[in-house]
Image: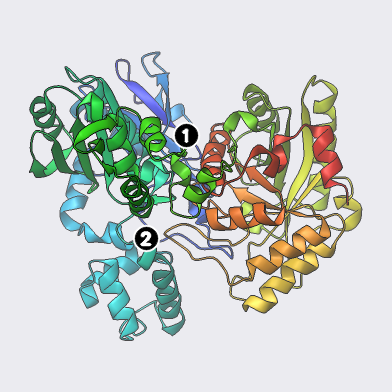
Amino acid sequence: MIRLRAPTVRTADPDSACSRRRLREPSQKADGHDCSQHRNRGHLQPHGRVAGDRRRQPVPRARLSPCGRDAAGPWRVRRQPAGSGRDLDDLPGIGEDLACKIAEICRTGRLKALEELETRTPASLAVLMTVHGLGPRRAKVLHDRLGVETVEDLARAAAAGNVRSLPRFGEALEKRLLDSLQATLPAGQGRRRLDSVEETVDELLVFLSRLPGVTRAEAAGSYRRRCETVGDIDLLAVAPNGQAVADAFAAHEDTARVLEKGSTRVTIILRSGLQVDLRIVPEESYGAALVYFTGSKEHNITLRKLGQAKGLKVNEYGVYNEGRRIAGRTEAEVYASVDLPFIPPELREARGEIEAAKANALPQLVTLSDLKGDLHLHTRASDGRSRLEDMVEAARARGYAHAAVSDHSRHATAAHGLTPERLSAQLEAIDRLNDDLKDFRALKAAEVDILADGSLDFPDDLLARLDVVIGAIHSDFDLPATVQTQRVLRAMDDPLFHIFAHPTGRLIGERPGYQIDLDKVMKGALDRGCFLELNALPSRLDLDDVHCRTAKAMGLKVAISSDAHSTLGLANIRYGVDQARRGWLGSEDVLNSRSWSELKALLAR
């Protein structure tokens, strides 16, 4: 038995992203999910750190990471005392071998087996495995046979037809790789998902705020605008002694390389490869700098032109009238100087927000507190990791009035989908649960597969017993756009259909969505009294912001849903709120901003 009495074992969010450092290539099911993620495993990363832990601590710590399907989100941890004498290998998913490795890390801060493996494994293989359809074995074959080290190398090799001849590849896989690269490289090259950098940003801001003389520290750039992906991280700090702050930041323990350092600017590359730009400004320039470095570039250009029309100079240092600073301490001052109200960062994309601000027509954006429920939760009855009772209690703890338990239907075999008999038993369990609940309603729901012919995976007599019917595509992604579109519209023709989940099926940076005429689907939903989901999993964020705004313009309401597969996964809904705000949605545009009685009336067809 392996006992740890002094250190702390850290347990990761079950909905957090799984490490891609797998020992064997995962099996891929019809909807592209890695079924091996459903097994409990500890995931170790380089430098003797455990997956997701970016800090070096005096006392090394281990993380135990049971992963959830479609897992996404930054590492948020809770502590379990290991000093109680509980055996590590008594914990779920921890065998004797893994317990020994955890003990070695806690004892020495290193893992010899990992270090030996790293010496034999090219670092580029981890990058290649971010491409959907590639696992460790295929990535190694590409590296060894074709010298492929980057996704750009892979794109060139596939375009030249050199991939198909490799063992276990073939022409079909080569085409899928090309399609995936084409969809993800142009917009996503060198970028990371928002959730994957959040912990790093938080830790850097804490680090800055604790430096002597620093009175403010804030993230800017695409991160502050809550874009789906970010490139470099832009940070802003206020301090009277910029050089001291710059020196301390450049010496941060996670710094791998310093690209630039002066008294007002520092640019570093972290060990993770992430570039971070820090600007240090005086208090009187803070607002102007925050506007400037938040962006977007196009938004800032428009602001400068408005200033020029008034004889003003607008830049990162302030707003100037004939060389005299007249504004810049706050963002509100900067906007007021050009006769505009404050514009929320999520809207600053030069998509009409300046014109709306001029007309005093900016939307009142939805907030997390506006949500009265979550309409997409999974339990361990299908591919979730928490019990029905625990998911309901977690929803209640968030202050919701209702939550929909929506496990998968039988066609989703990879997700252990429910048979009609198992769903019927679950509905009875929900009824019993509701008998004991006050001021909260657990909604009876299901995420029902839309089959290739447009029919739903459960019979109508069973669907009629549900409060919410969520239709979703998990197979036959390769249908032509016209066929895929008609498939969804036929499903919506069923009067028991309510919400179309993750409407494009994309996985950000991994898998493009299937071909579908989403505008036609949205119009069809509006005509039929159906709704679309904004799936808040950071790996999906599906709908995107552009289609959220289209939905608003049409009058089509959107359900912001966490798609949680554990109690901790309910927190992912905040990413959906971010996306909704980027899409100009207010609480009136969001289906689950309503009480159950109001929601029930909207769902009636």
Residue toward you, 579 or 15 = 579
Q: What element carries label 2?
A: helix
In the rendered image, residue 356, in percent from the top left (x then y), is placed at 54, 47
Q: Name the residue under label 2.
A: 188
In the rendered image, residue 438, in percent from the top left (x then y), is placed at 80, 19
Residue toward you, 279 or 203 = 279
Query: Is 569 left or right of 436, judged from the image as shown?
Result: left
- Residue occupying image coordinates x 37% and y 25%: 9
- Kind of residue indicated by mark 1: Asp
- Residue occupying image coordinates x 69% and y 69%: 520
Image quadrant in which you'd find residue 139 = bottom left
Q: Mark 1 points at which residue?
A: 13
- Kind of residue indicated by mark 2: Gly
In the rendered image, residue 24, in percent from the top left (x then y), is placed at 38, 58
* On screen, residue 32 above or below 381: below
Mark before the other along the chain sequence, 1 or 2: 1
- Residue occupying image coordinates x 86% and y 54%: 496
Residue toward you, 400 or 478 = 400
